[in-house]
Amino acid sequence: MRYGDIRINKTQSGKRYFKTVKYPEIPKSSSDLYIVGQVGDRLDNLANKYYKNPLLWWIIARANNIGKGDLIVPLGKQIRIPLNFNKIIESFDNLNNQ
């Protein structure tokens, strides 16, 4: 989903690569939900629970500056769940379909 519409470029030698992906800012909102990381919490599971789509884990990761190389939520860390995810996806699409 996240890379579905990202253009694939080719070098002169024929090597294929994805165009650089741009991410939108995810400002705080009064509709955001806050939780505290529990044992076993993972970004993809939280995305599935709150967005009904585990592939949207990157929204929670970017909103909290976590998830670089690991989907596990730090135990006891307060996590912001942006509930306006449709607007975030729209911004992502706008940035990457130019």
Image (tube, rainbow, N blue to C red):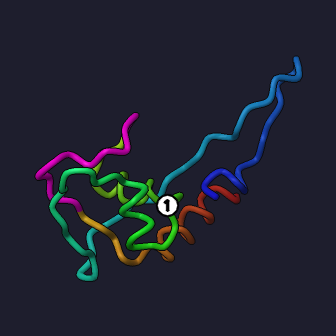
Q: Is residue 33 above or below residue 47?
A: below
In this view, 84 is above or below 53: below
Q: Residue at x 20, y 51 (%)?
A: 39
Q: Residue furthest front?
A: 40
Main secondary structure of the magenta stretch: loop
Give the secondary structure at mark 1.
helix
Check residue 75 for magenta coloring.
yes
Q: Which amino acid does the dot numbered 1 rest on?
A: Pro
Of 50 and 28, which appears nearest the observer?
50
Q: Is disc 1 surrounded by few (<14), some (14 to 19) or many (20+) residues within 10 Å? A: some
- Magenta part of the chain: 68-79
Give above or below for 44 relative to 12: below
Where, by quadrant of the figure, is residue 92 drawn? bottom right
- For this view, does 62 lie left or right of residue 8? left
Q: Which residue is mark 1?
A: 54
Q: Residue at x 78, y 41 (%)?
A: 8
Above or below 91: residue 75: above
Q: Position of residue 59 (x, y in %)?
A: 42, 59
In the rendered image, residue 53, in percent from the top left (x then y), is placed at 52, 67
Quadrant (top left/top right/bottom left/bottom right) for the N terminus = bottom right
Left or right: 80 in relation to 21: left
Residue 33: give x, y in percent of width and height.
24, 74
Q: Residue furthest left?
A: 76
Task: Kindly identify the residue that appears in the image at 88 percent across and 23 percent down.
Answer: 14
Q: Position of residue 69 (x, y in %)?
A: 40, 34
